[in-house]
Image (cartoon, rainbow, N blue to C red):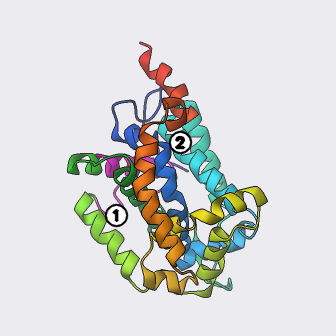
């Protein structure tokens, strides 16, 4: 059972939080493909995805579910947050394997696995915000880390598990990123390639194919190679163009396009007495 902190009926965070500041921006979704690949680069995460999801045909569905969980916990009312948290807990209860399983034992409730998944979301959001929107202060990065650790508690990750400062978090993330664990088993490459080279839905596959630079140019080359992925002159050119064009175009978007509907629905709830 989840042991959750008390919080307002309006929701867990609020308009003044750094959590809202970052997670209301659609631009940080551009970090989603790299975060998804980094998550499944961990052998036990990859094995869990392979054993308990239709990753060959539904990697887009996994992305939508992850995004829904992020936005519900960030912007939802107390009832919506608790419903989502308990729903994810029920789903994670099925993602288990004992020592007799072909890929060895794993559990969706393993705090080290949960920490790595959370870390990819934190790093992706911060790096994409700074790339496409503007700089963040050290204090804002620290506040976002603390907010996301609270967010992780609603999925069973103890808030005390893992780095508690932004500097320590960066040390942890870089050690994982450049260490030998990620991509060390064949299942990592198998699942990663299905995420990058989508089979379904066909229209989404066609739309995302030109944007593979969001993975290939955001992950270190040695890890890319272990995952059977590669950078090219086309992906490098695409990433160079995106870094120039996206910030300029994004700044011109109206709020109804920049901010998700979950954020816009939550604002009136917090503005009432």
Among the two numbered marks 2 and 1 on one chain, the one whose residue lies closer to the N terminus: 2
Q: Is residue 75 above or below residue 22?
A: above
Quarter-of-image position of residue 119 = bottom left
Q: Is residue 149 above or below residue 101?
A: above
Residue 187 located left or right of residue 147:
right
Residue 144 magenta-drawn?
Answer: yes
Rendering quarter of residue 102: bottom right
| Label 2 Cα crowd, 10 Å radius (few <14 / some 14-19 / many 20+) | some
Query: In terms of secondary structure, where does tag 1 sit?
Result: loop
Relative placement, left or right, of 30 versus 13 is right
Q: Position of residue 122 (x, y in %)?
A: 40, 56
Residue 20 vs residue 133, the one in the foreground: 133
Apparent side of residue 112 relative to residue 87 in the rendered image (left or right): left
Disc 1 crowd, CA 10 A, few/some/many (<14, 14-19, 20+): some
Answer whether residue 110 is visible to the viewer in this image.
Answer: no
Q: Is residue 85 magenta?
A: no
User: In the image, residue 233 lies at what x, y percent?
Assistant: 50, 77
Task: Name the residue that disc number 1 marks.
Answer: 162
The residue under label 2 is 71
Label 2 sits on a secondary structure element that is helix
First to last magenta residue range: 143-163
Count of residue discs: 2
Left or right of residue 273: residue 262: right
Vertical comparison of 65 with 11: above or below? below
Residue at left 77%, top 62%? 200
The answer to which image quadrant residue 190 occupies is bottom right
């Amino acid at each position: 059972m989840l042991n959750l902190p008390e919080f307002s009926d309006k929701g867990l965070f609020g308009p003044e939080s750094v959590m809202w500041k970052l997670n209301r921006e659609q631009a940080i979704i551009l970090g989603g493909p790299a975060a998804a690949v980094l998550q499944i680069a961990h052998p036990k995460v990859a094995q869990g995805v392979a054993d308990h999801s239709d990753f060959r045909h539904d990697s887009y569905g996994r992305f939508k579910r992850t995004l829904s969980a992020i936005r519900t916990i960030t912007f939802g009312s107390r009832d919506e947050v608790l419903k989502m948290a308990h729903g994810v807990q029920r789903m994670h209860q099925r993602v288990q394997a004992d020592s007799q399983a072909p890929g060895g034992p794993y559990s969706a409730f393993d705090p080290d696995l949960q920490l790595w998944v959370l870390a990819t979301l934190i790093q992706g959001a911060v790096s994409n915000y700074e790339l496409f929107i503007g700089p963040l202060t050290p204090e804002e990065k620290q506040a976002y880390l603390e907010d996301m650790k609270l967010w992780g508690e609603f999925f069973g990750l103890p808030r005390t598990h893992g780095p508690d400062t932004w500097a320590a978090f960066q040390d942890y993330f870089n050690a994982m990123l450049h260490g030998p664990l990620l991509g060390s088993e064949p299942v990592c490459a198998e699942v990663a390639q299905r995420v990058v080279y989508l089979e379904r839905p066909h229209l989404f596959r066609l739309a995302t194919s030109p944007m593979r630079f969001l993975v290939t140019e955001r992950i270190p080359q040695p890890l890319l190679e272990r995952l059977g992925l590669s950078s090219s002159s086309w992906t490098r050119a695409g990433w160079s163009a995106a870094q120039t064009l996206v910030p300029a175009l994004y700044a011109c978007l109206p709020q109804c396009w920049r901010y998700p509907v979950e954020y816009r629905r939550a604002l009136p709830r917090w503005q009432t007495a």
